[in-house]
Amino acid sequence: MSTKKIAFGTKPTNKPEPAPVDSWVENRAAGEAEAMKRLTIDIPESLHRTIKSQCAMRGTKIADEVRELLLKKYGNQ
């Protein structure tokens, strides 16, 4: 009966863990974009389908288009 030899690699080093994402978020520069808030609305399915297909053809996101329309209506007050 033959024995199988297994080679083990070198011992792992104690590399420092990367900084957590939370610390990056907390320490971002103050000049970055304003914090966002989520807005949920109900619209008819047919309207959603139309908006989604138009955005797909233009290669845009629904959220970006709705945000643009709201900014046109209400501005950056």
Image (spheres, rainbow, N blue to C red):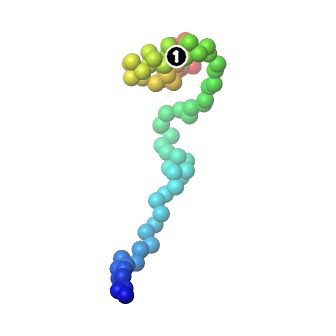
Farthest-out residue, bottom? 1
Farthest-out residue, front? 1
> Between 7 and 15, which is closer to the camera in this rendering?
7
Q: Is label 1 in a helix, a strand or a loop?
A: helix
35 shown above or below 77: below
> Between 51 and 6, which is closer to the camera in this rendering?
6
Give the residue displayed 51% in from the left and 51% down from the top: 21
Residue 4 visible in the snapshot: yes
Q: Callout 1, which amino acid?
A: Arg
**Left or right placement of residue 33 versus residue 9 in this view:** right
Q: Which residue is mark 1?
A: 49
Mark count: 1
Give the residue displayed 55% in from the left and 17% down from the top: 48
Quarter of the image that includes the C terminus: top right
Picture coordinates of residue 40 (x, y %)?
63, 24
Give the residue displayed 50% in from the left and 13% down from the top: 50
> Between 50 and 60, which is closer to the camera in this rendering?
50
36 shown above or below 77: below
Picture coordinates of residue 9 (x, y %)?
36, 76
Quarter of the image that includes the N terminus: bottom left
**Left or right placement of residue 20 versus residue 56 in this view:** right
> Between 42 and 28, which is closer to the camera in this rendering?
42
Residue 70 visible in the snapshot: no
Picture coordinates of residue 46 (x, y %)?
56, 12
Picture coordinates of residue 7 (x, y %)?
35, 80
Give the residue displayed 49% in from the left and 45% down from the top: 28
